[in-house]
Image (cartoon, rainbow, N blue to C red):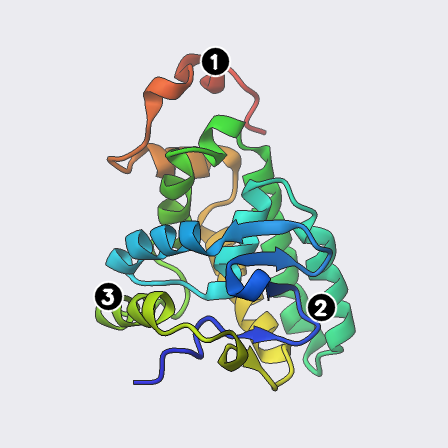
Amino acid sequence: MNTDYYYKAYKDYLWQYEEDGSVITLSNGDTIVYREHLLQILDRLAIQGLPCFTALLVVLSAARKKEIDVLLVRFYTDAQYEYQEVIKGYLEGALKLLRIIGQLPEEYRRGANEMVLLEALFKKSHNQRTAKASQRIVIVFRENFQLEESISKSKYHHNLNFTLRTLNDISLRIKTKEDLINEMKSLPDIVSEEFDLESVEREDFS
């Protein structure tokens, strides 16, 4: 089974590998995540099935307050899709979701709760990989990753379309910050000791 397609980068795209693949950055140079930490995330998400790799990186960027929304709009515009209205709808949904993530209190976006956030968002994502396929992808990414073989010569347009659709589908399920917090609270691993839940619930969720 070909698995390296999953984590391929694209030339002049939204994200890229740096430092021999040990770190993933946005096109503007901001660090998204180090590969070792990403492997820990993939190990956990593989249990429920891996989501779109770029969508995962976009969510991580939003949780870490990177200017990912600006970059998404830029690459969408540059792609000049034939079916503009359909993909524009995906973009609008994706941007709404990123705003919701950005509105979360820091305690819900960082530390141990970062993983809970990702599990809540991607537990029923579009075209999710099976658990078996996901585990194989993680093994290959950990043990057989080759940077020169992980750069696609194709255009990024299909990947961006797929990413936007994945994020838009999540936005149909999670429409408010309160929706997302409730999804996170329903999972068993949320770390409530690190913050005052009462103070969070007093916030305006509009």
Report how far apart the C-alphas of labels 2 and 1 lie in the structure. 38 Å
Asked whether the residues under the numbered discs 2 and 1 touch, taking CB atoms below 8 Å apart as contact, a structural biologist would say no
* Above or below: residue 170 compared with residue 1: above
Q: Indicate left or right for 182 with 1 as reference.
A: right
Answer few, some or many: residues within 10 Å of disc 3's Cα (few below 14, many 20 plus, some between 14 and 19). Answer: some
Between 200 and 115, which is closer to the camera in this rendering? 115
Circle 2 is placed at which residue position? 76
Looking at the image, residue 136 sits to the left or right of residue 36; the answer is: left
Q: Residue 163 at what x, y percent from top left?
A: 54, 66
Residue topped by disc 3: 131
Using the numbered discs, state the Cα–Cα distance from disc 1 to disc 3 in whole angstroms.
37 Å
Q: Earlier in the sequence, mark 1 or mark 3?
A: 3
Q: Position of residue 153 (x, y in %)?
A: 61, 86
Number of the front mark, 1 or 3? 3
**Residue 144 locus on image (x, y percent):** 36, 74
Residue 120 shown left or right of residue 146 in the figure: left
Residue on which the image places disc 1:
199
**Where's residue 71, x and y in %?**
72, 58
Earlier in the chain: of badge 2 and badge 3, it is 2
Amino acid type indicated by mark 3: Ala
Q: Can you say whether 51 is above or below 29 in the image?
A: below
Mark 2 or 3, which is nearer the eye?
3
